[in-house]
Image (cartoon, rainbow, N blue to C red):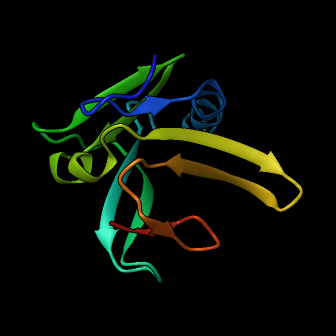
Amino acid sequence: MEPNQETVVVTANAARRISEILATEAPESVLRVSVEGGGCSGFQYRFDVTRERGDDDTVIERDGATVVVDKVSLDYLSGSRIDFVDDLIGSAFKIDNPHATASCGCGTSFAL
């Protein structure tokens, strides 16, 4: 599925890693991805394991993994692709965000 203005895509690699993480957490746990002010480029991504879901959360499910995004963060993340990379530098979730005009070296903060 290609990203569009309404969608956040979770890759198979990300879904696999999310499932591994959630398997060690309490039942009903999900991965919350959000955007908050701060970071070296203006905004930063935040990843939290939680059991709480808001009425306006967007729920993304893939291969047994569940990701939730709140309505405000979805405005910044729409069309994005959440991936998990494991390379020589290390392992991390990576967000390819079509709205970002700049990002920091570590990939956790971005500018619009």
Vertical position of residue 102 compared to residue 48: above or below: below
Looking at this view, is 29 or 110 the one in front?
110
Give the number of marks.
Answer: 0
Classify residue 11 as left or right of residue 60.
right
Q: Determine the image quadrant of residue 58.
A: top left
Q: Residue furthest front?
A: 101
Classify residue 90 as left or right of residue 4.
right
Residue lying at 19% horizontally and 38% vertically, measured from the top left: 57
Looking at this view, is 78 or 54 the one in front?
78
Residue 111 percent coordinates (x, y): 38, 70
Q: Determine the image quadrant of residue 106.
A: bottom right
Residue 68 percent coordinates (x, y): 32, 38
Residue lying at 43% horizontally and 61% vertically, measured from the top left: 45
Residue 29 percent coordinates (x, y): 41, 37
Vertical position of residue 104 compared to residue 79: above or below: below
Q: Residue furthest left?
A: 55
Which quarter of the rendering shows the C terminus?
Answer: bottom left
Classify residue 112 as left or right of residue 90.
left
Residue lying at 83% horizontally and 62% vertically, measured from the top left: 89
Residue lying at 44% horizontally and 30% vertically, measured from the top left: 9
Vertical position of residue 19 compared to residue 77: above or below: above
Residue 72 percent coordinates (x, y): 17, 53
